[in-house]
Amino acid sequence: MEEQGYIELRVTNKDNTLSPKDIDINEVKDFISDVETFLYPNRKEKQNRPHMSYDIEEGSAKHKFFLPITAVILFNGLTSEIRSRNNLDFLDYRRQSIIDKFQKKAVKEGYIIEFNNSISEESSLVIDYSTNFEMIAPTFYESEFYLYGEIYQEGGKNPNLHVSTKKYGNLTISATKEQIMNGEKKTYKPYGIKVRGKKSLEDHKLSDLELIEFIQYKPVFNKSLLEKVIEKASVNLSKITNVDTWIDDLKTDGI
């Protein structure tokens, strides 16, 4: 069994009167969720994370998490780097948003939040109403996306398409008259659509979509063709050391 350790968020207020009984259960829930996300920011990491347990202790209010020592080392390294740089620039969007959330809470509630752990004698980071750890990462990124769904409306004075998709719900996509009028009428038919636009880093919603081209939707599954494509691609795929990272870095989403 891997060596265990702990991380701790010690919360005090300006007049040092805070105790565990003053912490609402919703705030406790937020602390637990935020620490988990800070350590394991994406869905796959959360699904595969090790066992974590929680306790709240006296000493103002100490939110304490017990977990493997490797996670403690990660926590100590990230928070120490935030303190050293005095900014969040190097963090990914999810981690920036968690620290930004703690900063806003400290300002709103007059909190002092000390980040402590079992491998360091001093706080690796302190956030209070005088610090300024605010996120600067963009809230969206621009790219090209492939969408599949049924076109339920097209046209209008400012030409656009309305597409119903399973993944993103109903979407509006701007287009030209030529794009809409070209070929057969597409309303109430399933189509693949290649678009450019913005995708939110927070909730993954799409916006400002513009049509690039239509893709004829062919739902027939061709196993032999799939096997040939896999065989052809496997030579190059075997050269990729981290497939998950490679997929995350793809410029075109939704393929």
Image (cartoon, rainbow, N blue to C red):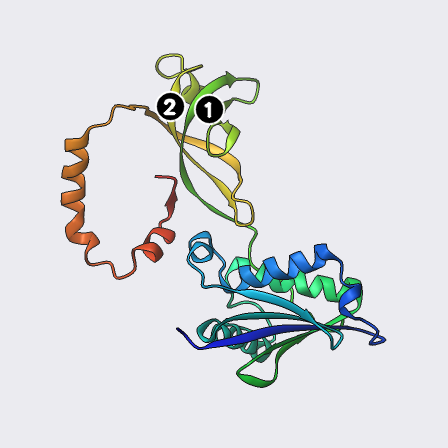
The residue depicted at 56 percent of the width and 49 percent of the height is: 202
Q: Nearer the viewer, residue 111 or 104?
A: 111
Q: Quadrant of the C terminus?
A: top left
Is residue 16 placed above or below 188 in the rendered structure?
A: below
Other-residue count near label 1 (Cα within 10 Å), few / some / many at <14 / 14–19 / ≥20? some
Secondary element under disc 1, as helix, strand or loop, is loop
**First reached walking from the N terminus: tag 1 or tag 2:** 1
Residue 3 in the figure: left or right of residue 35: left
Is residue 96 placed above or below 150 in the rendered structure?
A: below
Q: Mark on residue 142?
A: none
Q: Nearer the viewer, residue 93 or 52?
A: 52
Q: Which residue is mark 2?
A: 191
The residue depicted at 34 percent of the width and 55 percent of the height is: 244
Amino acid at pointer 1: Thr
Q: Mark on residue 176?
A: 1
Find residue 7 and report its horizontal and vertical position in percent.
57, 74
Q: Nearer the viewer, mark 1 or mark 2?
A: 2
**Residue that sits furthest to the bottom in the current view:** 121
Is residue 222 placed above or below 250 in the rendered structure?
A: above
Locate residue 243: give its quadrant: bottom left
Find residue 212 and report its horizontal and vertical position in percent.
40, 32
